[in-house]
Image (spheres, helix red, strand yellow):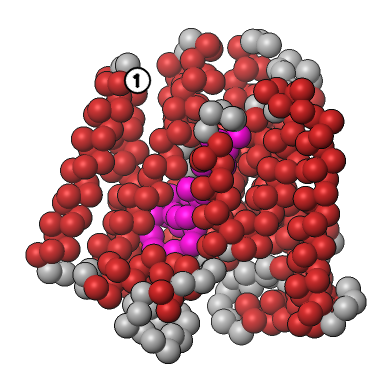
């Protein structure tokens, strides 16, 4: 690290602290709410540093992203030579900071941590507004603590695709909830997701197309929007099939062949986190995506942390789901959550067939499981308070 890295990191930290103070004042937050935001920022930075140390010890894609080594570029000195989707987009974003300014990997990590932090602020504020009517500081504090679940912080606080996917999802959810006033957030979120990981961007687009026509403010246009949304969904699915068929042949067998290749590719890395997903039933596949590693599978610190969070996730979903079934809470899901639910379900189905590595599954699901936890926590506490 050099002096410019130190100045850059100090500037980022200072600006975000000032921003939190100004936002808290403008929104009339109590001192406790302001302190929670400060604590969230410090915690997220800490997760970023933990991610940085983890990558230095174990290696990973993030280092290659920052050093512009993930994909070969003929004209490595040209910024626009890195333009593209997926990994190319990440390297295009990193290029000015890594190549021109020569920032250290830690500076890049802190930059990504700052970017992804802005996705946690709307979630914490949303939880505060939703739980405020319960008039219980313990309930509100419990909801805020869910925003501190480590998995999503760890994977979004470092150099990588998850930071953009997380921010993109939050922007889409915010834009949908406040449509049409914040339609720009919706478009920006879709753009980021499509550029960073196209398949997830397409699934997020499918989710928006399936949910947005039912927004209350679009009620008068529903007869037009529902057929358009249906056509968009069919078009996206057809586009993806044609895109694959042009490379593998116009039949559906290539889908299975591609999944088999994906499993072999992940198995090639070895390690103890591989799962025989091809041998599992559908229920076992989904259980693996949502809840593994189980507590009895713990083999070290990282698997212990993952199993504890998975166990908490299971308990919250089970108790909150029971509250819904008993009919003591409203079953209408707010638009803020609907996008995350559809997106999460579709991605989980995709991961159940395409992934067979626990580490990759934990990373990929991190961007949506926290929203599921928050919703079912709300169902649980509303049932307990008997508020309809």
Res 305 visible = no
Q: Where is residue 388? Give x, y as percent.
A: 68, 11
Which residue is tagged 1? 27
Q: Residue at x 43, y 40 (%)?
A: 120
Is 169 included in the stretch rendered in magenta?
Answer: yes
Above-or-below relation of 68 to 300: below
The structure residue drawn at horizontal position 52% and vertical position 55%, both measured from the top left corner, is 192
Q: Residue furthest bottom?
A: 74
* SS at mark 1 in the image: loop
Question: Relative to 210, is 149 on the left or the right?
Answer: left
Magenta span: predominant SS is helix
Q: Nearer the viewer, residue 143 or 279?
A: 143
Q: Is residue 235 left or right of residue 154?
A: right
> In the rendered image, which quarter contains the N terminus?
bottom left
Location of residue 56 in the rendering, given as x and y in whole percent from the top left corner: 33, 73
Magenta residues, as a range?
Answer: 151-177
Total labels: the figure holds 1
Label 1 packing within 10 angstroms: few (<14), some (14-19), many (20+)? few
Vertically, is 94 above or below 380? Answer: below
Q: Residue at x 49, y 15 (%)?
A: 132
Q: Is residue 228 magenta?
A: no
Q: Find the residue positioned furthest to the right.
A: 251
Question: Which of the two residues, 101 or 124, is positioned nearer the viewer here?
Answer: 101
Left or right: 179 as drawn, with respect to 288: left
Residue 141 seen: yes
Q: Quadrant of residue 347?
A: bottom right
Measured along the vertical axis of the image, is residue 358 above or below residue 165?
A: below
Q: Where does the image place residue 300, in percent across and percent down from the top left?
A: 47, 64
Whole-percent x, y for residue 302 in the image: 47, 61
Question: Residue at (82%, 63%) from the top-left corner?
Answer: 238
């Amino acid at each position: 690290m050099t002096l410019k890295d130190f100045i850059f990191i100090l500037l980022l930290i200072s600006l975000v602290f000032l921003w939190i103070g100004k936002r808290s004042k403008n929104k009339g937050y109590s001192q406790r709410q302001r302190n929670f935001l400060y604590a969230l920022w410090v915690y997220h930075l800490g997760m970023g540093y933990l991610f940085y140390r983890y990558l230095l010890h174990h290696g990973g894609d993030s280092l290659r992203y920052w050093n512009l080594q993930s994909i070969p570029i003929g004209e490595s000195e040209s910024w626009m030579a890195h333009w593209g989707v997926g990994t190319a987009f990440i390297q295009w974003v990193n290029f000015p900071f890594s190549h021109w300014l020569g920032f250290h990997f830690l500076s890049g990590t802190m930059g990504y941590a700052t970017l992804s932090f802005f996705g946690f602020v709307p979630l914490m504020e949303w939880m505060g507004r939703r739980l405020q009517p319960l008039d219980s500081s313990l309930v509100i504090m419990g909801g805020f603590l869910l925003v501190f679940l480590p998995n999503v912080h760890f994977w979004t606080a470092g150099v990588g695709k998850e930071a953009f996917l997380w921010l993109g999802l939050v922007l889409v959810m915010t834009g949908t909830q406040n449509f049409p006033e914040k339609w720009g957030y919706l478009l920006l979120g879709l753009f980021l997701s499509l550029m960073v990981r196209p398949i997830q961007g397409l699934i997020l687009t499918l989710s928006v197309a399936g949910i947005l026509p039912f927004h209350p403010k679009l009620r008068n246009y529903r007869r037009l929007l529902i057929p358009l949304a249906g056509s968009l969904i069919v078009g996206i699915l057809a586009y993806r099939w044609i895109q694959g068929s042009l490379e593998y042949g116009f039949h559906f067998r290539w889908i299975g062949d591609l999944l088999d290749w994906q499993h072999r590719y992940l198995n090639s890395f070895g390690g103890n986190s591989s799962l025989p997903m091809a041998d599992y039933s559908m229920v076992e596949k989904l259980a693996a995506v949502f809840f593994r590693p189980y507590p009895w599978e713990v083999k070290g610190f990282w698997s212990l942390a993952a199993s504890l969070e998975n166990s908490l996730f299971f308990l919250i979903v089970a108790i909150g789901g029971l509250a819904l079934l008993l009919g003591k809470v409203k079953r209408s899901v707010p638009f803020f959550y609907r996008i995350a639910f559809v997106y999460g379900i579709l991605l989980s189905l995709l991961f159940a067939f395409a992934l067979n590595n626990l580490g990759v599954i934990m990373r990929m699901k991190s961007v949506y499981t926290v929203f599921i936890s928050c919703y079912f926590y709300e169902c649980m506490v509303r049932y307990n308070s008997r508020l309809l």
